[in-house]
Image (cartoon, helix red, strand yellow):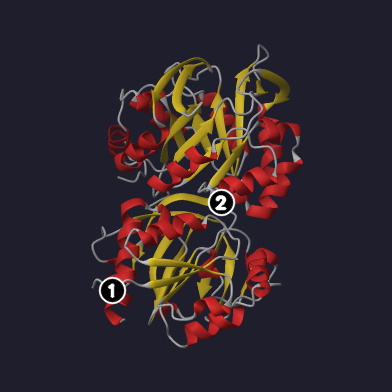
């Protein structure tokens, strides 16, 4: 249990990365800010964070030649955590830039915008509750419908519904988090979700710690 | 289940200390920003706003070390404003740990900054702060320089323009109610929230539990308060408990 994980945090210029790193460091794990494929060597877990525009995120990853290495990492079933944009990027494309930029394409499905409904304010910004689909180990020690912090205007629609681990409702139901083997990804920000977020991050990292 | 109303304590910072005045004047000391921010995270704040209230009027940069120290201590969203002038200022603040950056004076003087910054960093982190004051003709004018300069701009029109340019949220402060504890300017909130599609944070005038409830009924996505929380006249927990009983979606 005491083994420290070496965490590759992809630093590609999309949003407040310090908040992600300090939430991980809170568990005693070691952060490596990664900007190249070489930086992934000898790391235990890859974290892809990100806030901002889908198209810009793809451009930035391409500039660093990180698209292929990240896909390979996930295909080898190594531990992966995707947050917000880092979750959306796992899919094929996004409505945000009219589908022009191709994502990592790990999962079939696209990233869509919220429907235009009266009084539904966009972005979806603030604390909303989750409906947990599977009582997976990752959500242990949390309330039944835990609150997490969201800030986004788009969300992925996975073709394979079996990967959805939690849903959230904002005008419609959407996939708030997915899980498959050693991959966990979420639309909300655990690093900004106070106690619930820190518990979730601890749960995720402890699972990988055990398998290390 | 629904998106929760956010309760946001605001730290007005002057020369490295949290201060609070009335109608933007008569500043009183309310503590060290880092320990105050940390206390609010523990007490259940949904977000914290940090405003360097004299950075703009003194024509100097925001205190980055204080922002950094605050960001290190909290695990909830942090909005920072005051003295933000250009894209570089925004980039530096985001790198120092801010999740959102709030702009007032610079946005009025150069509206293109809203456009450019939301394109570069995403709308979600661009907050347009509007200090609004009633005029005798039943309108609201936009003030800049920490409430010292009347721009003659109509607050509703300016907010609409800000949304169009890419602001992700409006921080709406009623100068008439600021620090008075007489309640939020509900008419202003209603006018703005019925016009806009982005979230609006109500600010200025919170004094009783019911004021928060009324702001929510008027369409506010978040309620900001400063002196009420700084001096423990009401605790965040008490406000949230009251709202929950009233049936408002709230995170406890």
Horizontal relation, residue B88 to residue B2: left or right:
right
In this rendered view, identify the residue nearer to me: B58 or B77: B58
Q: Where is residue A95 in the image (x, y as percent from the top left)?
A: 64, 67
Q: Assess disc 1: are there few (<14), some (14-19) or many (≥20) residues with their C-alpha within 10 Å of its C-alpha.
A: few
Q: Distance between the residues labelled 2 and 1?
A: 30 Å
Figure check: A183 above or below B8: below
Question: Residue B73 at x, y = what percent?
Answer: 38, 45
On screen, residue A127 versus residue B122, left or right, reads left
Q: In this view, does A134 lie to the left or right of A61?
A: left
Q: What residue is drawn where x is 35% and y is 42%?
A: B41
Which residue shows up at 33% across the image and 70% down it?
A: A205
As helix, strand or loop, the secondary structure at mark 1 comes to: loop
Residue A148 visible in image: yes
Q: In the rendered view of the protein, which quadrant contains the N terminus of chain A?
A: bottom left
Residue at 46% over, 88% down: A76
The residue carrying mark 2 is B95
For the C terminus of chain A, the quadrant is bottom left
Question: Going by the picture, which residue comes out furthest to the bottom?
Answer: A76
Taking A190 as reference, is B245 above or below it? above
Q: Is B206 rendered above or below residue A191?
A: above
Are the residues flagged by discs 2 and 1 from a single subunit? no
Kindly identify which chain the residue marked by label 2 belongs to: B
Residue A29, picture quadrant:
bottom left
Residue B167 seen anywhere in this rendered image of the structure: no
Looking at the rendered structure, the secondary structure element under dot 2 is helix
Q: Report which residue position mark 1 lands on.
A: A3
């Amino acid at each position: 249990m005491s083994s420290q994980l070496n965490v590759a945090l992809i630093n590609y210029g999309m949003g407040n990365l310090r908040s992600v790193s300090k939430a991980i460091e809170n568990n005693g794990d070691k952060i490596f800010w990664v900007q190249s494929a070489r930086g992934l060597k000898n790391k235990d877990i890859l974290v892809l964070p990100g806030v901002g525009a889908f198209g810009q995120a793809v451009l930035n990853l391409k500039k660093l030649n990180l698209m292929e290495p990240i896909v390979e990492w996930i295909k080898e079933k190594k531990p992966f955590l995707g947050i917000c944009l880092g979750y959306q990027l796992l899919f094929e494309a996004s409505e945000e830039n009219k589908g022009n930029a191709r994502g990592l394409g790990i999962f079939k499905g696209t990233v869509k915008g919220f429907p235009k409904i009266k009084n539904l304010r966009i972005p979806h910004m603030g604390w909303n509750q989750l409906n947990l689909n599977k009582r997976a180990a990752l959500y242990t020690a949390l309330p039944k419908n835990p609150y997490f912090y969201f800030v986004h205007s788009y969300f992925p629609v996975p073709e394979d519904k079996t990967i959805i681990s939690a849903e959230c409702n904002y005008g419609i139901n959407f996939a708030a988090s997915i899980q498959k083997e050693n991959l966990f990804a979420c639309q909300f920000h655990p690093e900004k979700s106070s106690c619930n977020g820190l518990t979730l991050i601890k749960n995720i990292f402890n699972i990988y710690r055990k398998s290390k | 289940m629904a998106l929760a109303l956010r309760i946001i304590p605001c730290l007005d910072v002057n020369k490295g200390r949290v201060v609070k005045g009335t109608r933007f004047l008569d500043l009183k000391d309310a503590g060290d920003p880092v320990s105050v921010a940390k206390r609010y995270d523990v007490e259940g704040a949904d977000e914290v706003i940090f405003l360097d209230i004299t950075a703009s009027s003194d024509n100097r940069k925001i205190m980055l070390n204080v922002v950094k120290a605050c960001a290190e201590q909290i695990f909830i969203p942090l909005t920072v404003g005051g003295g933000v002038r250009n894209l570089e200022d925004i980039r530096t603040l985001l790198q120092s740990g801010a999740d959102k950056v709030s702009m007032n004076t610079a946005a009025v003087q150069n509206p293109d900054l809203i456009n450019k910054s939301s394109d570069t960093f995403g709308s979600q982190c661009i907050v347009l702060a509007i200090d609004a004051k009633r005029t005798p003709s039943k309108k609201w004018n936009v003030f800049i320089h920490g409430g010292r300069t009347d721009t003659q701009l109509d607050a509703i029109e300016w907010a609409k323009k800000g949304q169009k340019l890419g602001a992700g949220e409006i921080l709406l402060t009623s100068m008439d109610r600021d620090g008075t504890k007489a309640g939020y300017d509900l008419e202003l909130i209603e006018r703005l929230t019925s016009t806009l599609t982005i979230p609006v944070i109500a600010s200025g005038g919170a004094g009783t539990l019911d004021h928060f409830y009324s702001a929510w009924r008027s369409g506010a996505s978040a309620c900001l308060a400063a002196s009420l929380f700084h001096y423990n006249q009401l605790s965040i927990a008490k406000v949230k408990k009251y709202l929950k009983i009233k049936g408002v979606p709230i995170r406890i």
